Image (spheres, helix red, strand yellow):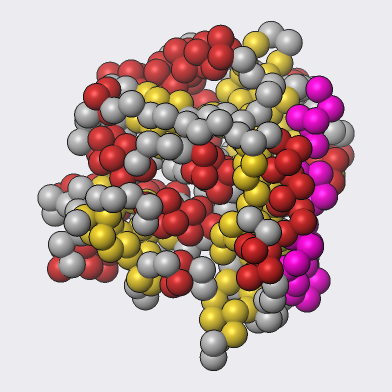
Amino acid sequence: MKRVLIIGSGGREHALAWKLQQSPQVGVVFVAPGNGGTEAIANNVAIRADDVEALADFARRNEIDLTVVGPELPLSHGVTDRFVAEGCLIFGPSANAARLETSKVFAKEFMTRHGIPTAPYRIARELGAAQRHVRELGVPVAVKADGLAAGKGVTVCHSYAQADEFLHKVLVERIFGSAGDTVVIEAGLSGQEISVLAFCDQKTTVPMIVAQDHKAAFDDDQGPNTGGMGCYAPTPFISADVLAQIRETVLQTTIDGMRQEGTPYRGVLYAGLMLTEDGPQLLEFNVRFGDPETQAILPLLETDLFEILQACATDSLDATTVRWEVGACVCVVCSAPGYPGAFPVGSPISGLSAAESLGATVFHAGTKRVGGQLVTAGGRVLGVTGRAGDLPSAIAVAYEAVGCVHFDGMHYRKDIGAKALRL
């Protein structure tokens, strides 16, 4: 039986552990550092996700057969490179390949080099030039910090004043530190935004079912950007023909381009796209499973996840058939009050058994146990996930279950999946 290590502590990692535990090939799952939910189904390990040396040492000493990287930070720190050097099998791209996410500038220049459809853009390193570029492109405009900013480094600005204010915060006030040394200023696009994730080895791409994330904090896409307030899959906004087009012009072109440039890509490639009147346009890359997309996608995966991830890590994905179950899945994120700004922690959580008795699956994100009591420990606390034969039924399961859950100041969006119902 295989021994698996998952790196990370959020809802995505709980979902990965939950799905990998279902594999007949997997015997033991470790999660480093894990959370209050993963400890119930796996073995939490007290190692930070960015402590590359300690993670590699743990994998070697515990004879881990496959390591799966959840968040982007350890990838940016070279965890894959370190594991490969130790001869340890790992699912996730190298630090150089991870630049598709860790540097917005690298990503946009890569898109340009390889003819991947994306919005016009400018690059700036000081406030005056950035403000001039905003006025060249006009509003709305997307302003993006170049480096990693925990999902909060992008703002769509609908006025010059809003753009100037955000640019001042990034380039002068340095709210993102060195991640904001450079900004990408991108012409605004309109349409439905979708998330297309694909399993990849260095030559093959296999798209997953397509999801739609809800990034704004409040209903009707109002309020500040977050790491994601909910997600559903599959989305009706994309046809099989358009997905095939995206696979060829975005996903496969990216994998081929990375290999040609000497940085072969293995892992999950996540393409955030806008479906415009001129066709799909690439907004950004992520280099790992999305959160909360993972919580809405994996419950519908029929093929053994361990088999797929191992195939990606060993360049044998072309020999693997990936199958999906019929139905829909909806994940509603329950967040702490104040998120994505400052938020309290330590609030007792109740009602999870009642929620799961309704048929929902509750994935933990920011939770921990203190003296046997489950309490909040992050901004996004839980992902309450409903699955059913169709989207309206999955929405109903998720929200009925959310109604059972309680912690002080709990906030959640009431409209996850509603865009699809308006068709």
Out of 205 and 226, give the one closest to the viewer: 205
Q: Which of the 4 quarters of the picture holds residue 365?
A: bottom right
Q: Does 414 lie within the magenta span?
A: yes
Q: Residue at x 63, y 62 (%)?
A: 356
Out of 278 and 122, give the one closest to the viewer: 278
Quadrant, the N terminus: bottom left
The segment highlighted magenta reads 402-423
Residue 421 left/right relative to 197? right
Out of 413 and 136, give the one closest to the viewer: 413
Residue 403 left/right relative to 229? right
Residue 60 left/right relative to 330? left
Q: Position of residue 125 (x, y in %)?
A: 59, 38
Quadrant, the C terminus: top right
Q: Residue at x 82, y 50 (%)?
A: 414
Q: Does 360 lie within the magenta span?
A: no
Q: Position of residue 368 (x, y in %)?
A: 54, 76
Q: Is residue 258 above or below residue 380?
A: above
Q: Residue at x 51, y 68 (%)?
A: 37
Q: Position of residue 278 (x, y in %)?
A: 69, 8
Residue 30 left/right relative to 174? left
**Residue furthest bottom in the image:** 371
Q: Residue at x 73, y 41 (%)?
A: 393
Assign the magenta stretch its main secondary structure.
loop
Q: Which of the 4 quarters of the picture holds residue 281?
A: top right
Q: Which of the 4 quarters of the picture holds residue 140?
A: top right
**Residue furthest left in the image:** 87
Q: Is residue 2 above or below residue 326?
A: below
Q: Position of residue 387 (x, y in %)?
A: 62, 45
Q: Is residue 370 above or below residue 91?
A: below
